[in-house]
Image (cartoon, helix red, strand yellow):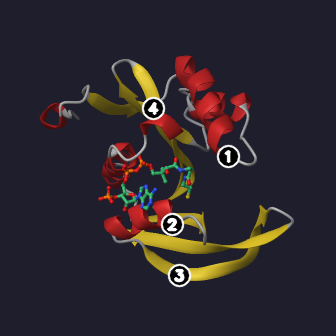
Amino acid sequence: MCDVASGREPCRVRAGSPADCAALADIDTLVSASPRGAARFEAACGTGDNRSECALVLEQAGVVRGFIVLAPVLDEVSIHAFAVHPEHRRQGHARRLLDGALERMRHAGARRCLLEVRISNLAARGLYEQFGFACDGVRKAYYPAGDGREDALLLSLQL
Ligand SMILES: CC(C)(COP(=O)(O)OP(=O)(O)OC[C@H]1O[C@@H](n2cnc3c(N)ncnc32)[C@H](O)[C@@H]1OP(=O)(O)O)[C@@H](O)C(=O)NCCC(=O)NCCS
């Protein structure tokens, strides 16, 4: 997928590989309150048929700018992690990643995509809304937040 019209460096969404793990862990450390750790990225970027998760990365000018980690189960797929490097946001990278992920999952036979998002995460909620995700419910006090807890919204999209 290219971005020539915007004048920025072209970018593409591709499967994560073992060589990407350090970059993914670095981005995750920058954005996550509880980073996943390199070992989980290694599993998601591997090639084994028994993987429970798989990662896609967005690469621009040869550099990884963001990632999405998916967990397919039968005809459903859950989004387990999703982030764009803080210095490269608002350039459509998350939209490209999500678009690429949903396209691949549809192709693989998935019929529904599921995820949880912090109620305060207006950036991610705006993105999911653009894709037509619907809210199925609320998980009360699901996430740690400062001294307390924060609700999660349960979202889904028919593919
Ligand atoms: C959420 C996140 C992935 C968005 O990445 P991004 O590359 O900046 O997003 P995009 O440029 O593709 O924006 C797509 C849409 O998302 C929404 N959005 C993104 N950033 C936003 C912001 N700061 N405020 C409000 N809406 C925002 C908008 O609807 C935007 O569409 P628009 O450009 O037409 O307004 C990024 O902010 C991030 O990594 N956040 C931390 C990790 C996270 O929250 N992951 C999601 C967990 S569920």
Q: Which residue is mark 4?
A: 65
Of the numbered discs in the image, which one, if any, rests on residue 84? none
Task: Tell me whether the residue at label 1 lies in contact with that at label 4, contact meaning CB atoms closer than 8 angstroms.
Answer: no
Q: Which residue is mark 3?
A: 136
Of the numbered discs in the image, which one, if any, rests on residue 32? 1
Which amino acid type is marked by label 1? Ser
Q: CA distance from mark 4 to mark 2?
A: 20 Å
Q: CA distance from mark 2 to mark 1?
A: 16 Å
**3 or 4: tag closer to the N-terminus:** 4
Task: Tell me whether the residue at label 2 lies in contact with that at label 1, contact meaning CB atoms closer than 8 angstroms.
Answer: no
Q: Is mark 2 within 8 Å of ligand 1?
A: yes
- How crowded pointer 1 is (Cα within 10 Å; few <14, some 14-19, many 20+) is rated as few
Residue located at (40% from left, 71% from top): 133
**Quarter of image, ligand 1:** bottom left
Q: Is residue 56 at least partly visible in the picture?
A: no
Q: Nearer the viewer, mark 4 or mark 2?
A: 2
Which amino acid type is marked by label 4? Arg
Q: Is mark 1 within 8 Å of ligand 1?
A: yes
Residue located at (33% from left, 65% from top): 131
Residue located at (72% from left, 41% from top): 35
Q: Secondary structure at mark 4?
A: strand
Residue 127 vertical position relative to residue 7 in the rendered view, above or below = below
Where residue 7 sits in the image (x, y, percent)?
18, 31
Q: Which residue is mark 2?
A: 122
Which amino acid type is marked by label 2? Leu
Give the camera-side residue of 147 and 100.
147
**3 or 1: tag closer to the N-terminus:** 1
Where residue 13 sits in the image (x, y, percent)?
35, 34
Q: Secondary structure at mark 2?
A: helix
